[in-house]
């Protein structure tokens, strides 16, 4: 099987974000045939506006996101929780990647959601909203790969998640399940083509 490419979209733009560190740790757990790339530049993409989404005139930052999501075999969302829901930057990324409707880069693309917050709720509201939005956008959400981290300020405030054995084990399981789903879908599609 060829390399499975996973693109990670992180909902916190802060350089020292624990959510970003979780994405970095997840990338470290990837097996040799799996590559995780953390997408840079979500904060540079304008808010989705149908007036901007015109063939040949799509903003370069939005077109680059669509291309990157389209080239990936799976999507990993890593989201904090802002005011009880997912950050605007992630919702915006989903909106751009879901268009054109019915044929966007997210269509039938396996995805999984990791949520993390300082509360004991573990950003589960944000997680649920991300799952809902991805599903409506046409993505195949692998809910078994879901992962929620609570009280991250205490748990990861002074150490990187890559130094937490339990977190690494959990992240590795999420990455493995997402990659296996992407590989299985690719094999099914290839078998269909060969019939």
Image (spheres, grey):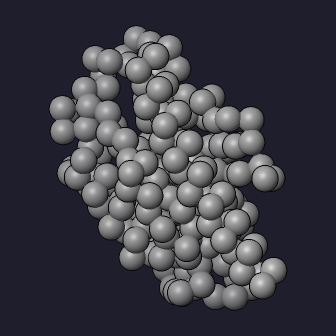
Question: Which residue is nearer to you in this view: 189 or 119?
Answer: 189
Q: How many marks?
A: 0
* Image quarter in which the C terminus is found: bottom right
Q: Which residue corresponds to the image point at 63% horizontal and 28% vertical from the top-left?
A: 28
Residue 162 place in picture, x, y as percent? 52, 20
Residue 187 to residue 51: above or below: above
Question: Which residue is nearer to you in this view: 37 or 182?
Answer: 182
Regarding residue 33, the answer to whether it shows in the image is yes
Question: Which residue is nearer to you in this view: 190 or 104?
Answer: 190
Residue found farthest to the front:
195
Residue 89 place in picture, x, y as percent? 45, 56
138 to the left or right of 2: left
Regarding residue 117, the answer to whether it shows in the image is no
Residue 159 place in picture, x, y as percent? 44, 13
Q: Which residue corresponds to the image point at 49% horizontal and 70% vertical from the top-left?
A: 139
Residue 98 to residue 21: above or below: below
Residue found farthest to the top:
158
121 to the left or right of 79: left
Question: Which residue is nearer to you in this view: 131 or 54?
Answer: 131
Residue 53 to residue 181: above or below: below
167 to the left or right of 122: right
The image quadrant that residue 78 belongs to is: top left
Q: Which residue corresponds to the image point at 74% horizontal and 75% vertical from the top-left?
A: 191
Residue 105 to residue 166: above or below: below
Q: Which residue corresponds to the image point at 66% horizontal and 57% vertical from the top-left?
A: 183
193 to the left or right of 131: right
Residue 193 place in picture, x, y as percent? 77, 81
């Amino acid at each position: 099987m060829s390399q499975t490419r996973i693109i990670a979209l992180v909902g916190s733009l802060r350089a020292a974000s624990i959510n970003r560190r979780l994405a970095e740790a997840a990338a470290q757990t990837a097996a040799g045939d799996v590559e995780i790339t953390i997408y840079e530049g979500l904060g540079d993409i304008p808010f989705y506006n149908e007036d901007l989404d015109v063939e040949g005139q799509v903003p370069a930052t939005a077109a680059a996101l669509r291309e990157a999501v389209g080239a990936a075999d799976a999507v990993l969302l890593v989201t904090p929780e802002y005011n009880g829901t997912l950050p605007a930057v992630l919702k915006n990324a989903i909106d751009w990647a879901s268009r054109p409707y019915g044929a966007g880069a997210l269509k039938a693309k396996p995805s999984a959601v990791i949520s993390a917050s300082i509360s004991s709720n573990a950003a589960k509201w944000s997680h649920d909203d991300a799952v809902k939005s991805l599903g409506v956008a046409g993505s195949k959400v692998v809910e078994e790969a879901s992962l929620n981290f609570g009280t991250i300020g205490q748990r990861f405030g002074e150490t990187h998640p890559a130094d937490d054995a339990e977190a690494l084990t959990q992240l590795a399981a999420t990455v493995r399940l997402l990659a296996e789903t992407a590989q299985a879908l690719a094999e099914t599609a290839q078998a269909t083509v060969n019939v």
